Amino acid sequence: MSTTINVMMIGDVISDSGLNIVEKMLPSFIQKYELDFVIANGENLHEGRGLNEEMIKRLYGAGVNVITGGNHSFDKHKIFPYMATDKRLLRPLNYPKGNPGYGYGVYDIPNGKGKIGVLNLQGRTFMYPIDCPFRTSDWIIDKIKQESQVLFVDFHADASAEKVAMGWYLNGKVSAVLGTHTHTPTADERILSEGTAYISDVGMTGAYDSVIGMKKEAAMKRFVLGTPSKYESATEDNHFASVIVKVELATGKAKNIQRLFFPEFDK
């Protein structure tokens, strides 16, 4: 039996453009990279803000095992009843009690390879003033690790400093701290000193002929004129942004992290 597993984290999947490239590419990536488990951030699936049940099920059909969220998880209220029933669909745990959905889960790894924990947290700098993600991690990690040493954290946050701080705060406590939200892939992937894989932002899966997934014209108007302009999802120049982390099952320590961005930009 293998002593390690390969886990992919797909960065924010934006609208139909992102979903389409996941459906097209993920099955072949699962084979090529011998992936044991796939996590995808899906809070931007529906029109760039929020989720719907059909698109969630399409992600599962493409090979995604768990979907994480963020500040847009609650934007489409019609998903609330479904969020309360699907334990593979996560939203940040540190939202106040009373909100629908699950903030973490422990899941069976296919082919009898054990269990994996997934925890979704959201930052507070430049974002909603919700409960502290650091203190939330204090009480939940021990509970999750009673079932599995392997634990992945999607930290959905705006400020790079807050993400880096969370990486060091959880160093040695979790297998990986993987940043989402800013939609721009960073080049700082590494294994921290106590065996935690880290990256500030996995990036965006979707249309890059855009401003972070939205049509350029509306975004530029907002900056130039300083007034609202309706956002619409972009459709062109689609890319798949992800990282693959190799983790030791017995210890939960990361052995390798690599970025996978496909196709690469033309140079």
Image (spheres, rainbow, N blue to C red):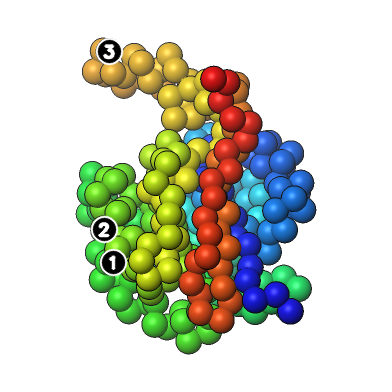
Q: Residue at x 54, y 20 (%)?
A: 267
Q: Can residue 77 be spotted in the picture?
A: no
- Left or right position of 28 against 140: right
Type of the residue with mark 3: Val
**Do labels 2 and 1 touch, CB within 8 Å?**
yes
Q: Is residue 256 visible?
A: yes
The residue at the point 50 percent across, 61 percent down is 90
Residue 62, percent across and down?
72, 50
Q: Nearer the viewer, residue 135 or 8?
A: 8
Sequence order check, earlier mark of 3 and 1: 1
Q: Which disc is residue 210 wearing?
A: none
Quadrant of res 170: bottom left
Query: Looking at numbered disc 1 in the image, what kind of residue is underneath it?
Result: Tyr
At x 65%, y 76%, the residue is: 3
To which residue does mark 1 refer? 169
Residue type of the residue flagged with mark 2:
Ala
Q: Tag 1's secondary structure?
A: helix
Answer with mark 3 or mark 2, whichever residue precedes in sequence.
2
In the picture, the disc for residue 165 is 2
- Is 120 situated left or right of 105 in this image? left
Q: Return the x and y of residue 92 as percentages of the image width and height.
A: 40, 60
Distance, label 2 to label 1, CA atoms, is: 6 Å
